[in-house]
Image (spheres, rainbow, N blue to C red):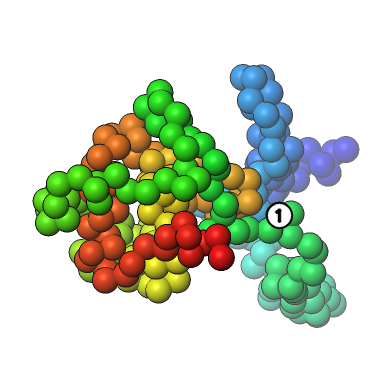
Amino acid sequence: MGRLRIAVRHSLGQAVLLMVLAYVLVVYGIPYLPPLFGIESAPVPKSLVFQYMGLVAVGVLIYVSRDEEHWAEFKEPLHRTLIDPNRKTLRGTMLVLVPILVGWLTYTQARPSIGAVAQLRAIHPAPPARITFQGRNIDITGLENPLRHRGTIEEHYAAGRRIYYQNCLPCHGDLLDGQGHFAHGFNPVPLAFDDPGTIAQLTESFVFWRIATGGPGLPREGTPWNSAMPAWDEFLTEDEIWAVIIFLYEQSGWQPRRWEESDE
């Protein structure tokens, strides 16, 4: 017990104790805080544990080096272990055990997992038969773009172009290639409309559904990498969304799939 008190009073002992207490708090303490505020508890990810412990280590080093006396006291056991002839056996043991420990930790982090995925992700999940748009129900099945039978394509293209450059450009890019200014901040990256595997494979009603409801409107099979796109029905009118869709197809050169083709 007396040796324990001495160890705790020593700068090195204090540093070790602080690191242990911080680890226990991060791994076991933090998950118990959310229920106190009515939030569901969840374990702290290993990446965050590593970051937190790194910050704690920096703080501990600042603490033990606050003056020359404490810094010298902190280094003394380490220095003695490395140069004292009477501790040759200890140094040899550390020389063997430390690489083994590092190798084991590296292996456990790098080894591939063969566990089954929790869910299958659909790249183009099936749209619902009906959505609610600004308080009004819209049937998606069989729905055609109403602007193609009203006014001129040139007028709708110009309106869609203006709306696209005001709202969609930062993510989807000037060339409709998904390489906008903010694109690399998302995972997955925004859709590239010039890709033949995107809107060229879809009906206009599908595109309307995705723009109107955004990432929040995706079904469960769209997870775990849901789109970061907002629900544009909170910002654009129905005609504005249809105009953007016309711009996307006209600008990319693709033709939308027709319901007759989809049902073949």
The residue positioned farthest toward the right in the image shown: 1
Q: Residue at x 15, y 47 (%)?
A: 151
Q: Amino acid at mark 1?
A: Gln
Near-viewer residue (123 or 111): 123
Whether residue 16 is visible, yes or no, is yes
Q: Residue at x 70, y 68 (%)?
A: 109
Q: Position of residue 103 (x, y in %)?
A: 74, 76
Quadrant showing the C terminus: bottom right
- To which quarter of the image does residue 180 belong? bottom left
Residue 178 higher or lower than 42, as above or below: below
Relative placement, left or right, of 72 versus 133 is right
Residue 212 sits above or below residue 264 on the image: above
Position of residue 190 measured from the top left corner of the image (x, y, whole percent): 39, 59
Quadrant where the N terminus lies?
Answer: top right
Q: Is residue 114 left or right of residue 57?
A: right
Closer to the camera in the image, 68 or 263: 263
Residue 132 in percent (x, y) is at 45, 30
**Residue 97, picture quadrant:** bottom right
Badge 1 marks a residue whose secondary structure is loop
- Vertical side of 174 occupied by 225: above or below: above
Q: Residue at x 76, y 42 (%)?
A: 6
Residue 20 appears at what percent x and percent y?
71, 45
Judging by the rendered image, the residue that carries numbered circle 1 is: 119
- What count of labels does the image hold? 1
Label 1: how many residues lie within 10 Å, few (<14), some (14-19) or many (20+)?
Answer: few
Q: Nearer the viewer, residue 44 or 182?
A: 182
Instruction: Tell me which residue sits at (26%, 71%) in the image.
Output: 253
Say if residue 15 shows up in the picture. Answer: no
